Image (cartoon, rainbow, N blue to C red):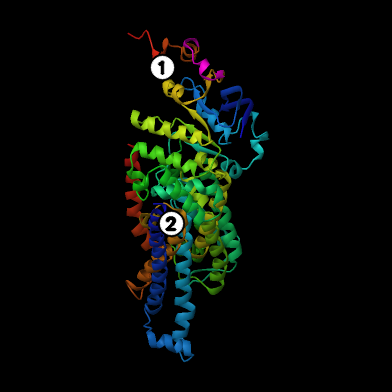
């Protein structure tokens, strides 16, 4: 399932955040969107499934303009994991994950929806918290169930906005390993990440955003000292270790 | 493992359904008790005689023309106000929202008073307990609905404003209430003595005015609206996690919110135009029910509807019997009960932020 962005412009109150962005996302890609704060990473993600509608330009899903696809049909193909949850809901983890079945539910969930959620809970190995209130679980568990909720949509493409922000290193790895498994199962992953080393470790394609546009995109070969220094305007060393590349800021002390 | 989890969840669902059934049963019991209570003593024998056709004419009159319409009016108003409150709270993601606190009731009251006084949709009696009588319910409800829509649009505009906090929306509700309150004062100023008494009495919020014709109109509007809300409950649940997330699971937040708010304001308008302002029911009931059913609108909406019926019926039965033979307007009682809770919720919401 491929996505194509053609000359996307997006502005909040007249201030452009994305300007003339074009790129193509292929089936099975694990894409990391990287770039400094305010480079438009979150806006980019939100333009992909009509959460935001660009002022100019077209997003194509399987060669079809997404502006002409209903929210419901899009929701069956793409799922979104928000950076920050706005809700103060009092729900059990089971009910929370069940929300992801909305595109398939008319007015009440059927037996197949309940079964699907139970299976996901089992796959994610979170049975022990399934009937707990979502306000009584840890930050790491919350992030895990928000991904589980997205999986309940049975998407082909998973959009994630900073899913590892505010998590300790153990939970960061857990979440990223989980995404790796999902990617292996054929789900395309598009993720915004602040941590460039996490991005290098897990993604197979990178889109660097700078000055409201795509600065450079490609595979691991674009993760060079020159590109990264230009992207973040800091000095770095890119070190080749046995288990991959590492970016270390330099000249700080 | 999956089977075990499913059975656990089904038990949890059954518990919530059981609560709804218990409230439903309580509604019948309380309605029955309410039918027997009042300044004129009616016992089970009288009821039996009523069914066999041997009832005394006074008993017949009291039950069929006074108590039964009043009980049904209380249930329907309780259902309408509570379900509107529950839906508005979900749609605006605002725990302080309700038809009364957002000024929708105040706006509807002005619309109804305007229809009664200026458009001639009501008549007045000088020496009756029932001071204001509606002769054209369609005009009164229509006028109340139009004015309540005005307040709904102001609220929706404000909620779209970036950074609009729940407290800010409630403040705008107070402003809307004051504005339409001033409108009612102006109507009172230009009314004659009898009209003035009618408006004042009518704004108290009293369930004693229900006639069978009025009840029929209410049933025709309230029941389909309730079913619509239940049908849409999953969309409301989706909105609770934010508009962006709602879009990502296939819900159009603008359309859903607009249709929900318009329907909720119609329900408020119909209650206000027949009975005046009955404050705080739409705020108190969903809060109590949410503690039991959680935030799942599929259970919250029907449970709030039934619990609202029970709540207003108990309040009205108390209002009728507590200083019998004097009958208090139920609006006064619900305000005494609701105001402290509103204050408590306000403090709790503000505390969460600072």
- Judging depth in this view, the residue of B324 and B257 nearest the camera is B257
Specify whether residue B99 is in view.
no
Residue at horizontal 33 percent and vertical 49 percent from the top: B343
C-alpha separation, residue under disc 2 versus residue under disc 1: 58 Å
Look at the numbered disc 1 and give the secondary structure of its residue: strand
Residue B113 vs A202, above or below: the answer is below
Q: Residues within 10 Å of mark 2 (few under 14, many from 20)?
A: many
- Judging depth in this view, the residue of B186 and B304 nearest the camera is B304
Horizontal and vertical percent for residue B306?
44, 64
Specify whether residue A57 is in view.
yes
Q: Residues within 10 Å of mark 1 (few under 14, many from 20)?
A: some
Residue B197 vs A64, above or below: the answer is below
Horizontal and vertical percent for residue A2?
62, 32
Q: Quadrant of the C terminus of chain A?
A: top left
- Judging depth in this view, the residue of A87 and B255 nearest the camera is A87
The magenta region covers: A216-226
Residue at horizontal 65 percent and vertical 35 percent from the top: A62
Quadrant of the image occupied by residue A137 = top left
């Amino acid at each position: 399932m491929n996505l194509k962005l053609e000359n996307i412009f997006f502005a909040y109150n007249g201030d452009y955040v994305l300007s003339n962005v074009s790129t193509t996302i292929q089936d099975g890609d694990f894409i990391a969107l990287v770039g400094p704060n305010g480079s438009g990473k979150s806006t980019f993600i939100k333009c992909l499934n009509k959460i935001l509608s660009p002022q100019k330009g077209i997003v194509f899903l399987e060669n079809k303009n997404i502006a002409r696809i209903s929210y419901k049909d899009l929701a069956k193909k793409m799922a979104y994991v928000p950076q920050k949850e706005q809700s103060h809901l009092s729900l059990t983890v089971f009910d929370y994950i069940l929300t992801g079945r909305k595109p398939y539910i008319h007015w009440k969930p059927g037996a197949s929806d309940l079964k699907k959620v139970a299976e996901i809970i089992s796959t994610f190995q979170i049975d022990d918290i399934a009937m707990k209130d979502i306000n009584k679980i840890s930050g790491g568990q919350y992030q895990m169930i928000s991904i589980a909720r997205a999986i309940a949509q049975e998407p082909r493409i998973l959009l994630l906005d900073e899913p590892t922000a505010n998590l300790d290193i153990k939970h960061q790895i857990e979440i990223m390993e989980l995404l790796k498994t999902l990617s292996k199962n054929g789900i395309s992953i598009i993720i915004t990440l602040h941590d460039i080393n996490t991005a290098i470790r897990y993604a197979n394609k990178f889109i660097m955003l700078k000055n409201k546009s795509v600065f450079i995109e490609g595979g691991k070969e674009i993760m060079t000292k020159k590109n990264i220094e230009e992207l973040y305007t800091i000095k770095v060393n890119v070190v080749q270790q046995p288990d991959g590349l590492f970016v270390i800021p330099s000249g700080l002390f | 493992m999956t089977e075990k989890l499913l059975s656990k969840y089904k038990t949890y669902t059954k518990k919530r359904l059981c609560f709804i059934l218990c409230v439903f049963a309580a509604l019948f019991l309380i309605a029955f008790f309410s039918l027997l209570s009042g300044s004129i003593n009616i016992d089970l024998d009288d009821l039996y005689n009523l069914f066999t056709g041997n009832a005394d004419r006074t008993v017949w009159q009291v039950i069929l023309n006074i108590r039964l319409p009043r009980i049904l009016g209380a249930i329907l108003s309780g259902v309408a106000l509570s379900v509107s409150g529950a839906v508005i709270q979900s749609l605006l993601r605002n725990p302080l929202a309700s038809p009364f606190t957002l000024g929708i009731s105040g706006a509807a009251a002005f619309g109804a008073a305007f229809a009664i006084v200026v458009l001639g949709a009501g008549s007045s009696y000088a020496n009756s307990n029932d001071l204001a009588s509606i002769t054209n319910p369609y005009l009164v409800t229509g006028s109340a609905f139009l004015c309540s829509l005005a307040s709904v649009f102001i609220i929706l505009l404000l909620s779209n404003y970036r950074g609009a906090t729940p407290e800010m929306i409630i403040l705008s509700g107070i402003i809307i209430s004051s504005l339409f309150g001033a409108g009612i004062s102006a109507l009172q100023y230009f009314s004659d003595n009898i009209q003035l008494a009618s408006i004042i009495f009518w704004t108290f919020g009293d369930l004693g005015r229900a006639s069978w014709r009025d009840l029929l109109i209410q049933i025709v509007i309230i029941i389909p609206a309730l079913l619509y809300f239940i049908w849409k409950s999953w969309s409301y649940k989706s909105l609770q996690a934010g508009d962006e997330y709602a879009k990502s699971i296939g819900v159009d937040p603008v359309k859903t919110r607009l249709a929900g708010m318009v329907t909720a304001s119609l329900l408020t308008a119909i209650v206000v135009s027949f009975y005046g302002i009955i404050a705080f029911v739409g705020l108190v009931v969903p809060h109590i029910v949410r503690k039991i059913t959680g935030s799942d609108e599929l259970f919250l909406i029907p449970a709030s509807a039934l619990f609202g019926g029970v709540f207003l019926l108990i309040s009205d039965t108390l209002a009728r019997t507590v200083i019998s033979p004097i009958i208090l307007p139920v609006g006064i009682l619900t305000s005494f009960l609701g105001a402290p809770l509103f204050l408590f919720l306000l403090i709790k919401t503000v505390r969460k932020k600072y």
